[in-house]
Amino acid sequence: MDFLSQTYIALRGPTGAQQSPSETIAKLSDRLSPSTLLADRRAAVLALKGLARDCKADVGSRALPGLIQVLQDDADIDPDIGKAVLETLNSLCDVDDASNEKDKEKELSLKHTDYFLNGEQASHTLFKLLGSSQFYIRFTTLQLLSTLLQNRRTVVQNHFLKAQNGVSSIISVLGDKREIIRNESILMIQSLIAQSPDIQKVLAFEGAFEKLFEIITQEGGVEGDIIVIDVLRCVDGLLRFNSSNQSYFRDTSMPVVLCSLLQFPPKLQLQDPSPQEFALQFWNQQKTSNVSLVIGLMGMLIGSKGSSSQETHVFVRCLIELALASNAPTSLKTQALQLLPSNSAFPLADVVVTPYMPVPETNGEEWDRLEPASALDVLVELALHGEYNGLFGHKRSKDCLELRAAALGVFDNFVRKEEIKQAIVKGMIPQQVSTNAPPVSPLLYALCLPPSTSLDVANITATHFATLLFSHLLISSPQSKALARSIKPSFPTSSTAGSQGQFFVPADGVPSSTNVLESQSEDEDAPQSVLQLLSENLSLCFLSRSRVDPAKDKEAREWDRLIISYLALLIQWLWEDPKAVREFLDASGLNVLVEPINQTTDSESLIPGLCAFLLGVCYEFNREPGEITRSTTHPIISRLTVDALVGHMTRVREDDRFKSVGPELMVLSYPAAPGVLGGSQRTQDQDQDGEIWFDWTFVDFWKSNHYAVQRSLGANPDTLATASGPSAESMMLIGSLREVIRTQAEEIDSLKNKLKELSTDIAEVSAPQLCFISVLPLVNELKRKVAGLEAAVQDAEKKRKNIEKEQEDLLVLLDEMSTKRKRDKERMRQAGLDVSEDEDEGEDEEEDDNE
């Protein structure tokens, strides 16, 4: 009753006349003076709290200094006045998104925030109040700090670093047993550590990781609710872009905790299968989001500098098992594959995984365990047929295609080494000593599978991915191309290498027979080479495409996609491979290319452009003796006209299906059917459909070489090929030397970065925030590491200089060989021998281009 009486008297005034809000706020502001009684100040704050929402500007302009004074003097003494003043300040600084004048509201809130943060004392008071055990004091303080961080994060962060009890207060709040306070503190910490490496380091060394993972454990791990997501985001914020915290994190037991959250044993051997409790789990949307953040942390630690080989091995194995041998959602499998490092030396061929397949009509509650296989084999099967051995291969789901594209990317990274490419291709060559036909690999089977008369989306997509996989084995590898020309697949009447692969057999069953290639079962002649089969399949595709009803747009689009996949593979294979060009031309490949160029349509620009490019490649590298030579091909090019061919190639670059492809984007959205363009008319399934036309490897190859092909189309048939240069062996040697130099340069940069980080750490050790660390032993240890790194940098510099000198010597040798060649030609002219002048001109033009 006293409170109501005092408030009523303050609002009524001495004479009982009604006052305006400004007059009332002015009188209440006067009552905030320290000279008044605590009860009067409490009553004034409570009254101002009620007026702050409707009269925000007046309260801020008149009462804000007094409110800040009350916060500093009374909040830690009287919980009631502390709660009221904190709520009032939060109301003054908060931006009301529902306001009709949002811009004016935001400007006013920022003005109040700037006044509050004008000095450090008010902020330091807030961090001090976090140490209070009173529920409402802690809760409202966290709310006000969150508001201030949202408005002026950098200023609050600077004040926090200077506060004596700031770090300890934050850590103590994380340990609060009251969920509301703990959850509010996690949200506040996310804003506090954003883009502030110093705060991230201080909190990490004070035990933030341990507190956060303790909360995750208390909430049930990845099975927990939304609070687990917030905690994992805090962990991610402490680690990402902070190499010091990442190094500290690795030295703790937290990496093992990450594996245990997913129920993956960190000491699993290469030949041991993963436990079933890891592979088969129950999934919902919340758990999927939680696990996504966990494997995101693993991927970050794998890709960062300073990670140990043992830690990297455990995390990579966990991601591989999750992607290839579990029932995890498709999005998680895709993310796991994308997080694998591009330069990893992980032995995919040596790791044994045990895939699973859902039992039909059990709604994912029962699973069949399949035969163990190497991770590389399962990876190829995943790219060829999709999840669960092609169970959903007939669908155009964008998520499924992105998973297969991610598997393709991992395969590309794995085969970057020349010896690995050659080993895989060599494994496809039948052994001469074998009396029985060897089993055909799934990759080779899908690559050579002839197109059926009826449209089969699953087979078309499998063949498309087979061409992409095979192209990665051949590109920039003359030895692999030579080996590939020797592949003559022989398809037996009963094989375990059918479209579903030879590795996927239920553990409690027997291998099932698969369909075989019809053309091979009827043909008893010697097996054809892969190039001959590709040429025949391409011709059959053009024939099937010509018979499609124009009204069936989807069917025509699928045939176009298959044709383009064959053309893209042939372009990359025949490039700088004259023997492959000769084999393709002898297989009537030239006839296959000319007709699509003549029969161009406005609706399709890719196929004529790719055919024109492949024709240019055949003309450019047709150097082997045979029936079809450059001289016999030149009249065909002249009849088609060079300008028309170049125009077809130019339209390829302008096509959305080509120019939309990037290093991280391969799966495109499937276009809407005619008449279903409206967003409200499209179904949800259509929104999720996707398609693949090219990968970035081919797009980059095209952009690098299409000008050379354009020049070659206009060259005289007697002219030496413009794209020719040093021999393949010389180019490989130069390329290897350049790769060594590039590797050495990367190592030098890495060592320099480590040296810089260690120097920074030495300087930071003396900072007042890290006074709790034992300084002297750490400084000595860091100095020893710096000395070792300096020596390593000097050694790497010497190696790089030696490599550069070797390359210079090689280039000098090549120049001397070129000079000697010209001198020999001059002697031949003096002796009256015939020497082509065009050849010299072509060489000069090439030298100018290289310059």
Image (cartoon, helix red, strand yellow):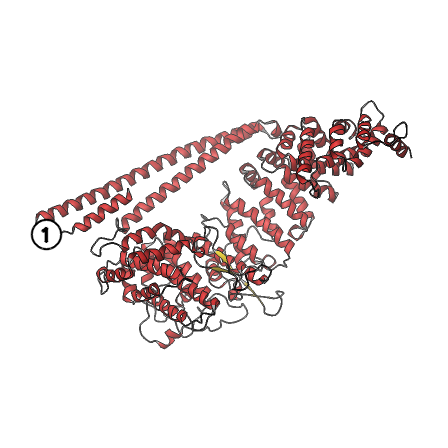
Task: In the rendered view, tell whether residue 113 sits above or below residue 249.
Answer: above
- Residue type highlighted by circle 1: Leu
Residue 467 rendering spot, x and y as whole percentages: 40, 61
Instruction: Report which quarter residue 249 is drawn in.
Output: top right
Q: Quadrant of the N terminus?
A: top right
Judging by the rendered image, the residue that carries numbered circle 1 is: 833
Residue at 32% x, 51% y is 707
Between 819 and 247, the one nearer to me in the picture? 819
Task: In the rendered view, tell whether residue 346 sits above or below residue 604.
Answer: above
Residue placed furthest toward the left? 831
Residue 453 in sight here:
yes
Instruction: Report which quarter residue 490 is drawn in.
Output: bottom left
Between 629 and 777, the one nearer to me in the picture? 629
Residue 486 rendering spot, x and y as whole percentages: 31, 63
Residue placed furthest toward the bottom? 522
Instruction: Report which quarter residue 9 is drawn in.
Output: top right
Dot 1 lies on which element?
A: loop
Residue placed furthest toward the right? 1
Between 728 and 777, the one nearer to me in the picture? 728
Task: In the rendered view, tell whether residue 402 sits above or below residue 435.
Answer: above
Q: Is residue 58 left or right of residue 536?
A: right
Residue 140 rendering spot, x and y as whole percentages: 75, 37
Between 509 and 3, the one nearer to me in the picture? 3
Q: Report the number of discs.
A: 1
Residue 626 rendering spot, x and y as whole percentages: 22, 64
Q: Is residue 467 left or right of residue 577?
A: right
Task: In the rendered view, tell whether residue 45 sits above or below residue 587.
Answer: above
Answer few, some or many: residues within 10 Å of disc 1's Cα (few below 14, many 20 plus, some between 14 and 19).
Answer: few
Q: Quadrant of the C terminus?
A: top left
Residue 351 in sight here:
no
